[in-house]
Amino acid sequence: MVSRPRRAFVLGSVARSSNDTPFPNNGQAPIATTEFRLQGCAGQGEVGPNVDEQYWDDMAERFEEGVLEIAGVDQEGILAEEIKRLRWAGRTAADLGCGPGSLLPQLAEAFVHVDAVDYSEELLDKARRRHGRPNIRFQRGDLIKGGLGGMQVDVSFCVNVLLVPHRRKLERIVETVRDATKPGGHIVFVVPSFESVLHVYESLARVRRKEGAPEGLSRKKAEKQLHKFVRCFVEGVVDISGVLTKHWTQTDLEGTLEDAGLQVERVRKVPFSWVEEIDRPPVWLDPRLPWDWLVVARRV
Ligand SMILES: C[S@@+](CC[C@H](N)C(=O)[O-])C[C@H]1O[C@@H](n2cnc3c(N)ncnc32)[C@H](O)[C@@H]1O
């Protein structure tokens, strides 16, 4: 058994690939190297790929291999449970940043009408081909620019979209999701957990203590790797295969939503298998799986 972080993710805990290349695009240099500069962080001035609609268009063909869709690996059915719970909250729903649409079958089943929005034409096409139903309307839209044609739904879902390491862009996405939701309506966000990143490294050190070398990582090596991949502890920015990806602490998430005028009702873990993080993980790690955060908030 080799236990090591599967640092070949494409986008944090939402977008993992099984190969070990340093970049998501098959070992090539990042798709673009212009936009993200971390300000005021340890990695200040560092540049990552520009994760924009072009990036996601390019990902479309190999999305399933390269990107982990949380709806498909939700070990305890937390997302499905929340959809069942919220189906009574209204008749209309939106999947904002729907990607290839893994959540759409459940939403189309639970709600009378579903709006599926993404800014990637390619992914939207894929979602339409895979999951097109009469009660789903597909719409191209940029959640940073906002203005989704006055959309007003009872329940909004925004699953693993809050990923860019730009505070203002993240706030804009939250505001667009809020504005697309009726006052009194509910919003579900799922995001990569920064605590879970720490948990992975702490667990690797634990594996070494319990099983001895070469399993896991020494404390020193775990510390070194953590510092290598976490580019900004304050903002939770983690280098995932060369892509700077926002990870959220629970308090950061709650505070950001509250600042946008949303009322946080509950925060839950969405645990997923260790194989998404570690090669051949020992079974005794299973009681404490890595996780994404899920938050249910209300537009007041
Ligand atoms: C990691 S994927 C998640 C897809 C899907 N929600 C899931 O859970 O499988 C991120 C998705 O968000 C979309 N996205 C990111 N930023 C966006 C924006 N500003 N406006 C619209 N869609 C966006 C991407 O195109 C991509 O489909």
Image: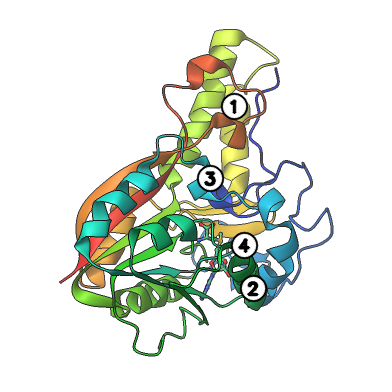
Disc 3 residue type (three-letter) = Gly
Disc 2 residue type (three-letter) = Asp
62 w.r.t. 119: above or below? above
Side (left or right) of 243 relative to 94? right
- Mark found first going from the N terminus, 1 or 2: 2
Question: For residue 151, which quarter of the picture?
Answer: bottom left
Counting from the top left corner in percent of width and height, residue 178 is at: 30, 74
From the viewer's side, name the closer residue of 233 and 216: 216
SS at mark 2 in the image: helix
- Tell me whether circle 3 and circle 4 mark residues in contact (CB < 8 Å): no
What residue is pinned by disc 2?
Answer: 125
Q: Is residue 160 visible?
A: no
Is the residue marked by circle 4 packed among few (<14), some (14-19), or many (20+) residues within 10 Å? some
Counting from the top left corner in percent of width and height, residue 96 is at: 44, 70
Please, which residue is most extreme toward the top here? Answer: 211
What residue is pinned by disc 4?
Answer: 130
What residue is pinned by disc 3?
Answer: 72
What residue is pinned by disc 1?
Answer: 220
SS at mark 4 in the image: helix
- Mark found first going from the N terminus, 3 or 1: 3
- Tell me whether circle 1 and circle 2 mark residues in contact (CB < 8 Å): no
Of circles 3 and 4, which is in front? 4
277 w.r.t. 106: above or below? above
The residue shown at (50%, 48%) is 70
Image quadrant holding the N terminus, namely: top right
Of circles 3 and 1, which is in front? 3
SS at mark 1 in the image: helix
Of circles 4 and 2, which is in front? 4
Counting from the top left corner in percent of width and height, residue 239 is at: 61, 53
From the viewer's side, name the closer residue of 262 and 94: 94
- Mark found first going from the N terminus, 4 or 2: 2
